[in-house]
Image (cartoon, coloured by chain):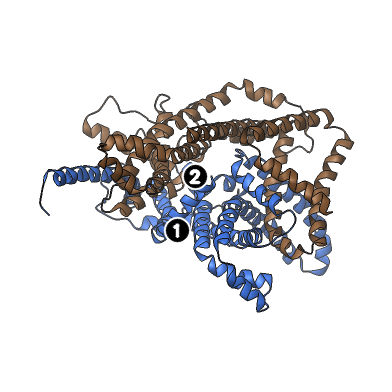
């Protein structure tokens, strides 16, 4: 028993301490192998027997090991969390994998196994890639304008000014509001007939600019992106401010003594020390913004046409609108894989920046 | 202090900075004020009266939204879900985090990294399988209830049995399913946060309690939980906000109007009465008010939670 435990521990440390690149390569290879095995043997009983034996066997192994070591009393503490996690995270995870290889309408008792054709369809789906482009556009605006605004505000608040805490509290109000509320308020402000924005523009004399902001294909996406930034800049501001405040003041003083002006000390002291924080904010912005959708549901519902559709609203539409559960899951997996690649790439870049 | 060139330019810069910050702060608050102001106008004045503070305050809009708009029901539902989910998360995650931090058992590291991995791997569209799961379990439950009904009819009065069956089908099951789903959403973050907190806590008190003959559950209840109050406060606030603001799972799991929480109710109301802006705005004010109260009262903990969440992410 202890021999096996020792071996497992060795394998575990080997995997855990491997560099990220190796982990990623091994992970991708393992995924491809499993996928091939699944495609080849999905109809064979022996394959599923082996899979189920492995899964239940490892669970039984853990429980038996706990019984032998007389640690079952401690193990029981994590059982509720494990149960909830297994039912609501691990089961759905494998359900997604299963559904994405099937054509299923969500009601009928039988699913059609279709192999990889759902994924093929996703790759050829123009609306889907249009939605991806829209999400990319919103993300680009969030990465540049939202984060620039957050950085400027954080720098302003990092100066020893009065009422710093007041601003901090105010700037974080939009992030704690729900996306539905934010979307509905702004939907009305943007409204073509009764909206506040058009009233204000008319009162100021800009007659040509007045339009139905959210139904105009030219402006709808940008309007949504602006509101997303309005809702999100508080997060970036908070994290950036926390990062700025960890920089020792002596460094700025030393820079000033050496004759550096404000810009030089910003460039040579603040930026190099803040790079990890910048990367963190960038990753959070990308992962958060790409997956935005409740705001869009409450502001435009994806319209006009498909001009404000984003990937998650497409997944929802495939599921609720056209009852293609398998296709929805294939879209989800494709999107999740893209997000994983983006965050891996960013982590790699940050590591390189840190070494340089 | 003598006024020289340096202090003059410095205070001028500070004034400019303040002007900039105040403008941004105003844009943060203005939509909320606008929403509140509009909720006090009438249907006829709401499109013409553009003032923030209307001349005649129509507080009855709130009463109408609460009763006729159905926001009273939605509010109580939101409260119900938030309380149960947060309570569940605190109990389950503090058990697990305590075990991960203080106890040793085979499989510990494996399970902990499983929870960590759940936070790292993005699963967009995870609502699809959850919807399938909840639906399948409901079908199984209904079938077995229908199968068992004749048996129960022999023991209990008819009315009671049919009442129970419809209660389980329409009230108990959807609510329980939604609460469990939401517990899972907040679980990983809470476990991670509490584990790091427990790791930093001194062990001596627990040792003393053990020597005095306290059981493991007793130590958790009487020593670990009281000491972890700051971390638990962060977890409570963070999860309350996320449950109160949650929309998509409520949309998929809770389809009848007497089960809906506020966010879902707002969307339904908006779809049904598209131009009843004063009532909609009153409903939104009802939705936002508890959040703002909690936020202003507890903002210290919220800021702590953000930095912790950022470190996790």
Q: Are marks 2 and 1 in contact (CB under 8 Å)?
A: no
Q: Which residue is mark 1?
A: B301
In the rendered image, residue A334, in percent from the top left (x then y), is placed at: 63, 30
Count of marks, rendered view = 2
Q: Secondary structure at mark 2?
A: helix
Residue extending furthest toward the bottom = B212
Q: Secondary structure at mark 1?
A: helix
| In this view, B205 is above or below A251 | below
Q: Which numbered marker is on residue A36?
A: none
| In this view, B306 is above or below A331 | below
Q: Which numbered marker is on residue B267?
A: 2
In the rendered image, residue B301, in percent from the top left (x then y), is placed at: 45, 58
Going from N to C along the chain, the mark reached first, 2 or 1, is: 2
Instruction: Give residue A19's quadrant in the image.
Output: top right
Horizontal side of residue A349 vs A322, given as left or right: left
Q: Colour of chain B?
A: blue
Q: Colour of chain A?
A: brown
Horizontal side of residue A176 vs A92, given as left or right: left
Horizontal side of residue A65 vs A272, given as left or right: right
């Amino acid at each position: 028993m202890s021999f096996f435990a020792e071996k497992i521990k060795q394998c575990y440390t080997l995997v855990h301490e491997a560099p990220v690149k190796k982990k990623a390569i091994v992970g991708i290879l393992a995924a491809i192998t499993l996928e091939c095995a699944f495609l080849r043997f999905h109809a064979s009983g022996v394959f599923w027997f082996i899979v189920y034996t492995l899964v239940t066997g490892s669970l039984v192994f853990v429980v038996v090991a706990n019984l032998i070591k007389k640690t079952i009393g401690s193990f029981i503490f994590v059982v509720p969390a494990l149960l909830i996690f297994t039912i609501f995270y691990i089961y759905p995870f494998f359900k997604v994998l299963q559904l994405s290889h099937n054509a299923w309408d969500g009601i009928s008792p039988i699913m059609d196994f279709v192999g990889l054709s759902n994924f093929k369809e996703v790759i050829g789906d123009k609306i889907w890639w249009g939605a991806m482009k829209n999400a990319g556009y919103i993300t680009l605006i969030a990465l540049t304008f939202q984060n620039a605004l957050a950085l400027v505000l954080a720098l302003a608040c990092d100066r020893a000014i009065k009422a710093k805490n007041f601003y901090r509290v105010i700037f974080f109000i939009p992030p704690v509001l729900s996306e539905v509320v934010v979307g509905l308020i702004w939907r009305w402000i943007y409204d073509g007939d009764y909206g506040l924005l058009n009233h204000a523009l008319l009162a100021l004399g800009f007659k040509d600019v007045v339009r139905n902001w959210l139904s105009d294909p030219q402006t709808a996406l940008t309007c949504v992106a602006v509101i997303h930034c309005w809702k999100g800049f508080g997060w970036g501001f908070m994290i950036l401010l926390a990062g700025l405040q960890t920089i020792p003041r002596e460094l700025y003083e030393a820079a000033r003594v050496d004759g550096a002006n404000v810009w030089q000390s910003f460039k040579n002291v603040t930026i190099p020390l803040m790079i990890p924080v910048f990367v963190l904010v960038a990753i959070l912005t990308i992962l958060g913004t790409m997956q935005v959708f409740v705001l869009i549901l409450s502001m435009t519902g994806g319209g006009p046409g498909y001009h404000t559709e984003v990937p998650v609203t497409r997944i929802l539409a495939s599921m609720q609108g056209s009852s293609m559960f398998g296709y929805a899951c294939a879209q989800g997996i494709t999107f999740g894989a893209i997000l994983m690649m983006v965050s891996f790439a960013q982590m790699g870049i940050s590591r390189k920046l840190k070494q340089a | 202090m003598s006024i020289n060139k340096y202090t003059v330019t410095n205070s001028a810069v500070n004034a400019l900075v303040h002007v900039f910050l105040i403008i941004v702060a105003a844009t943060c608050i203005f939509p909320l004020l606008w929403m509140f102001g509009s909720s006090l106008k009438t249907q006829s004045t709401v499109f013409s009266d553009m003032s923030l503070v209307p001349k005649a305050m129509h507080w009855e809009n709130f009463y109408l939204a609460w009763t006729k708009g159905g926001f009273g029901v939605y509010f109580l539902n939101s409260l119900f879900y938030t309380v149960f989910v947060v309570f569940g998360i605190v109990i389950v995650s503090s058990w697990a985090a305590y075990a991960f931090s203080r106890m040793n058992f085979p499989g510990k590291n494996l399970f902990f990294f499983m929870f960590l991995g759940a936070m790292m791997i993005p699963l967009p569209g995870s609502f699809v399988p959850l919807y399938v799961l909840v639906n399948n379990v409901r079908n199984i439950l209904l079938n077995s209830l229908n199968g068992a009904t004749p048996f129960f009819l022999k023991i209990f009065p008819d009315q009671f049995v049919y009442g129970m069956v419809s209660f389980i089908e329409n009230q108990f099951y959807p609510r329980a399913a939604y609460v469990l789903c939401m517990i899972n959403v907040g679980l990983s973050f809470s476990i991670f946060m509490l584990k790091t907190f427990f790791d930093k806590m001194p062990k001596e008190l627990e040792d003393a309690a053990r020597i005095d003959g306290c059981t493991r559950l007793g130590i958790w209840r009487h020593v670990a939980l009281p000491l972890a109050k700051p971390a638990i406060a962060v977890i409570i606030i963070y999860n309350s906000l996320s449950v109160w603001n949650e929309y998509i799972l409520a949309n998929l799991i809770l389809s009848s109007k007497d089960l809906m929480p506020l966010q879902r109710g707002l969307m339904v109301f908006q779809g049904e009465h598209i131009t009843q802006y004063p009532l909609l705005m009153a409903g939104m004010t009802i939705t936002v008010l508890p959040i703002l109260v909690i936020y202003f009262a507890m903002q210290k903990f919220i800021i702590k939670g953000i930095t912790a969440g950022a470190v996790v992410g």
